[in-house]
Amino acid sequence: MYLVLLAWGYVVVMMAIAEALSPQGTVLGAFFTLLLYGVGPMALAVYLMGTPLRRKARRRQEAATAPGSDAPDGRTEPPAVAQEPRISPVREEP
């Protein structure tokens, strides 16, 4: 991931230098080239590629702060099981 970002950064810096040194180019154009071709897309790529790591860290932190429980909702007792009404299999005469 970092190698791709480094290579893209190099390409964008070279584009910005070419823009600034070109007879028809300007320093303002080089700045916007650097900003719109470099910083914006690289920030978006880093954010999207880092999503799984942030999710793991958040789950790890939530598990560490749960009060002594391995349950995902933080409860320590098991959930209640619904009781079925007791019906006798044979009808009894009064």
Image: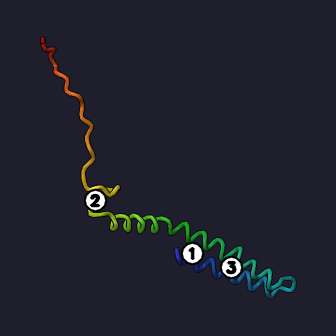
Nearest the camera: 88 or 56?
A: 88
Residue 12, numbered circle: 3
Residue 64, numbered circle: none
Residue 23 location, quadrant: bottom right
- Toward the front, the furthest residue is 94
- At horizontal 24% and vertical 31% (from top left) the residue drawn is 84
- At horizontal 64% and vertical 82% (from top left) the residue drawn is 10
Q: Are marks 3 and 2 in contact (CB under 8 Å)?
A: no
Residue 70, numbered circle: 2
Of the residues shown, which amino acid type is indicated by label 3?
Val
Residue 58 location, quadrant: bottom left
Q: Is residue 60 above or below residue 93?
A: below
Residue 76 location, quadrant: bottom left
- At horizontal 75% and vertical 82% (from top left) the residue drawn is 31
Residue 4, numbered circle: 1
Q: Residues within 10 Å of mark 2 (few under 14, many from 20)?
A: few
Of the residues shown, which amino acid type is indicated by label 1?
Val
- At horizontal 25% and vertical 49% (from top left) the residue drawn is 78
Q: Disc 3 or disc 2, which is closer to the eye?
A: 2
Q: Residues within 10 Å of mark 3 (few under 14, many from 20)?
A: many
Q: Quadrant of the C terminus?
A: top left
Query: Whole-Å distance between the Cαs marked 1 and 3?
Result: 12 Å
Nearest the camera: 58 or 32?
A: 58
